[in-house]
Image (tube, coloured by chain):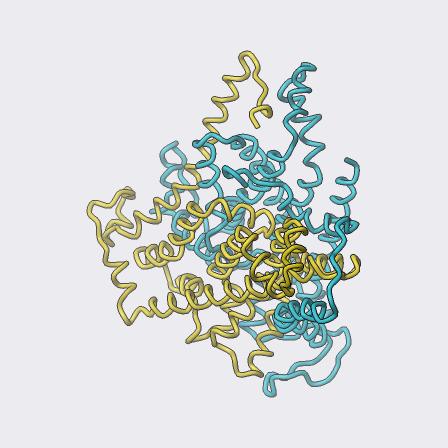
Chain colours: A cyan, B yellow
Amino acid sequence: MENGQVEISTCPFFAMSVYRDKRKVKSSKFKQSESILLVLFLLPTFFFIVIAQFYPLLYSVYISFTKWSLVKWKPIGFIGLFNYQQVLQDTLFKHAAKISLLFACIATPVELIIGFLLAYMVIGERKIIRITRSILIIPMTIAPVAVGTMWRMLLNTRAGLVNYLLQGIGITGPNWLATPLTAFLSILMVDIWQWTPFAMIIFVAALSSLPPDLFSAAQIDGASRWQILRYIISPLIAPITILVILFRFIDSILVIDIIYTTTYGGPGFSTNVITFHIYKQALKYFNVTYAAAASWILQIFCLSVAIVLLAYSGKLQEKF
Amino acid sequence: MKKIYPKEKGWGSVFSLIRAIVIILGTSAVLLPFIYLFLNSIKPEFEFLSIPPRLLPSRIVMKYYSSLLTPESETLSFLYNSLIVTSATTILAVLAGALAGYSLSHFRFSSKIIAIAVFSILLVRFYPKITTIIPYFILMKKFHLLDTLVSIIIAHVSITLPFVVLLMMSFFRDIPRSVEESAKLDGCNVWQVFCKIALPLSTPGLATSAVLTAIISWNEFLIASSLASVNAKTLPIAVSAFITDKGILWGPMSAMTASIVVPIVLFTLLLQKYLVRGLTLGAIK
């Protein structure tokens, strides 16, 4: 942390290190009254998590199997898997799922690659480098909603900065948000602009934590920069790379704020991503049980991706 | 750290050139949109759509900012709501999170229980928040808390708490046990050890948690927009409202967006030290 240096221990790996921790430090023995006090310490957290996470999660499973009365505003009777059937037969849902998958499959690798290149360039302790790093992380800290409105102006056909710059190199820019393909490219661009810094910052942490001796040894052995990158750095940061992929993939599947403020799912349904689809079903058409079922399909998908990638990353890490 | 860039003949200078270009390109890609936004917010109306487009304003107008401050625009009440939600969320999440983090790092839970706790905390990061929004909406309706700041604060605390707990656990584990042991020998009970020893020794952790929580809460849109309809609207909701209008209201939209962005940009630049640690753990959302 000193001098803006980042420690690797702060990365999500921490969670796994806790898991593997064999509790080397024996906790001191507490008197019974003190143990009770320590358990009481957990209560506030328990309260918030139960009220706003566990209960809603369980309730949404429950209503996904019921028929909903809009008049009484509560479930009226079980209908089994009917809602799930309805969701899976819905062409709009399938379309939204496709759009989201495509979006995530393009955005994730692009962010990963640019993020790594940037990270590789901005490692170091010189003041200018540190300032550059601070500037580069700004996009990911500002509100996605604001990023959306900002890009709506930047992408404006006549007065937007993007087309203005394109004009400068002799290209007539398209009407970005008005045709399906360019609208899709636009939201990709916005997502990449906002979240590449995330990949960068994790890679900066990972690269900074590598032992410097390794590089001087390799250098003495006559390894070139490319060889060091290819044979030493990349295997060492492989586990963290998997985590970056995991974070970025899930977050791009769940993107909604920037869609809301740039294209609102349009034109037509060309940028109607999955979370936005569910959001509209739930809060615009009050199709509550449909939304619950759809969100659980999404839920199961996300959690399986998360578990698989976390396990894979853990396995890679164990090798070293 | 220098060792990562081995000194090579020829390559070295080419590499520093590439490096300089990448850094210039990267920072301008980040900064230009902000400069453009700021220029838009002080540009006279007729200049937005002039042909060819004019980037630099011919004169500076502050009317969009001053119109945000008039009573009709309601921006002040959005700002007020955002400030209340953000500060309450930060205080509650850091307090509750510090307590839980201390308990998890000190009590003799079996390591299985800890692993389960940590794992479920991590999973909160990965599941679609949209799943909980509808049931939470229904629950708040039952409690007659819809469209209140309380409902938003509780939700925000619940999504930020997991990160705070993880962060604080890592900080409390770094405190040498001997310090706490000797305090206990001097007759302090758990509560006193927590308040007088553990908390003061982990102020960087508290600061990191607070910065992270404040940013997440200030930016959060999805949950707030589902709960607030009239009275409890926060700034992100006000910003998002510009989408429903036909066409773009350039001036007001720029001024509004600038006012939600500027505090966070300053925050980022000033508190970078704490922020980076939180970001790499919390993977901010």
Q: Quadrant of residue A271?
A: bottom right
- Which of A288 and A205 lies nearest the eye of the viewer? A205
| Residue B127 visible, this orientation | no
Q: In this view, does B146 lie above or below B265?
A: below
Q: How many marks?
A: 0
Q: Which quadrant of the figure contains the N terminus of chain A?
A: top right
Seen in the image, is B107 located left or right of residue B62? Answer: right
Residue B195 rendering spot, x and y as whole percentages: 57, 62
- Say which residue appears at 30% left-offset and 52% top-offset: B41
Q: In which quarter of the image is the C terminus of chain A?
A: top right
Which residue lies most toward the left here?
A: B59
| A129 sits left or right of B166 in the view | left
- Give A250 or A130, whichever is nearer the viewer: A130
Q: Nearer the viewer, residue B206 or A205?
A: B206
Q: In this view, does A285 lie above or below A138?
A: below
Residue at the bottom extreme, as displayed:
A72
Seen from this angle, which residue lies furthest top? B9
Question: Does the rendering let one see residue A93?
Answer: yes
Corner quadrant of residue B119:
bottom right
Q: Position of residue A92 (x, y in %)?
A: 63, 63
Image position of A298 (left or right of A204)? right
Residue A190 % position (x, y):
49, 48
Task: Give the answer, above or below, for where B148 lies relative to A95.
Answer: below
Q: Position of residue A284 (x, y in %)?
A: 53, 72
Q: Residue at x 76, y 45 (%)?
A: A314
**Residue at figure coordinates x 56%, y 74% from the top left:** A285
